[in-house]
Amino acid sequence: MTPPTPPAPEERHPVDVGLLFDLRNPDAWHRPWADHYAHTLELCEEADRRGVGGLWFTEHHLFEDGYLPQPLTFAAAVAARTRRARIGTSVVLPALHHPVDLAEQAALVDLISGGRLELGLGAGYRRPEYALFGAEFGRRFQHTERNIAEILRLWREREVTPAPIQDQPPVWGGFYGPRGARIAGRLGLGLLHIDRTVHEHYLKGLAEGGHAPETARVSDLLPIILSNDPEAAWQRVGPHLLHQLNSYRQGALQGTGLE
């Protein structure tokens, strides 16, 4: 049997590799905060020079390890030191912020970067964060949808100045369940989650919002560890991954009475 012919070079689709940063700095590996942030900026600059496709930043509050609380602020610093990579958030929590503030911050990142912003927005999952901001955890999905819609309106109607370079920066919904997927669809966002079980809800949301199904966009975060010696790499990386997993689980329980 003749093996299948590989696709011609022009038919191949390149893969953009991106890096996600949460800027954690736990006690076990702690370094001075200013050094930690400076080192990350240098890493982003070098990754951009080497052709990385995207640099992404994420938001959480009240983590003991100093999880990045203001991703758009850091994204602006990265935008000023890079030239090619897309600059994204995965995700910012709009229910914790005023939509005018987010629309202005995001526009500035787009301007500083020369039109490279990808804005990912989500509802979050931690009660202490909502309490910190005086926001209603039980209505986080309604408030998230409302604030995203308002950000889009502010840009569309040019009610914040200066406006972003991109006519509308790409906006993504970072949702993992059916309810959020439907919100992303209704608002005409891309969905930052690849899962067959929620894709049908995303398509239903697109229809509800009057958006054509061919406008659907999906993407996701896929952790990858590259190493010539996987066993040695695991010894180095494993403790960090375990810390990350345990802190996410602990964070989900905080404020529920199940800690």
Image (cartoon, helix red, strand yellow):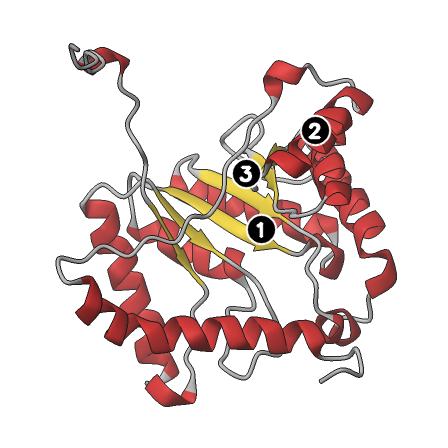
Residue 175 lies, with reference to residue 182, above or below; the image says below
Q: Amino acid at mark 3?
A: Ile
Q: Looking at the image, which residue is at 31% across and 42% down?
A: 17
Q: Position of residue 222 (x, y in %)?
A: 42, 48
Whole-number angstrom distance, CA of label 1 to CA of label 3: 28 Å
| Residue 30 visible within the image | no
Q: Looking at the image, which residue is at 72% across and 18% down?
A: 211
Give the residue at mark 3: 194
Q: Amino acid at mark 2?
A: Glu
Residue 220 lies, with reference to residue 7, above or below; the image says below
Whole-number angstrom distance, CA of label 1 to CA of label 2: 33 Å
Residue 105 lies, with reference to residue 229, above or below; the image says above
Q: Position of residue 193 (x, y in %)?
A: 57, 42
Q: Secondary structure at mark 2?
A: helix
- Nearest to N terminus: mark 1 or mark 2: 1
**Which residue is nearer to you in this view: 223 or 165?**
223
Q: Nearer the viewer, mark 1 or mark 2?
A: 2
Q: Residues within 10 Å of mark 3 (few under 14, many from 20)?
A: some
Q: Position of residue 166 (x, y in %)?
A: 51, 29
Give the residue at mark 2: 200
Which residue extends farthest bottom? 27
Q: Amino acid at mark 1?
A: Gln
The image quarter in which residue 227 lies: bottom left
Whole-number angstrom distance, CA of label 2 to CA of label 3: 11 Å
Q: Residues within 10 Å of mark 2 (few under 14, many from 20)?
A: some
Give the residue at mark 1: 105
The image quarter in which residue 203 lies: top right
- Nearest to N terminus: mark 1 or mark 3: 1
| Residue 243 visible within the image | yes
Which quadrant of the figure contains the N terminus? top left
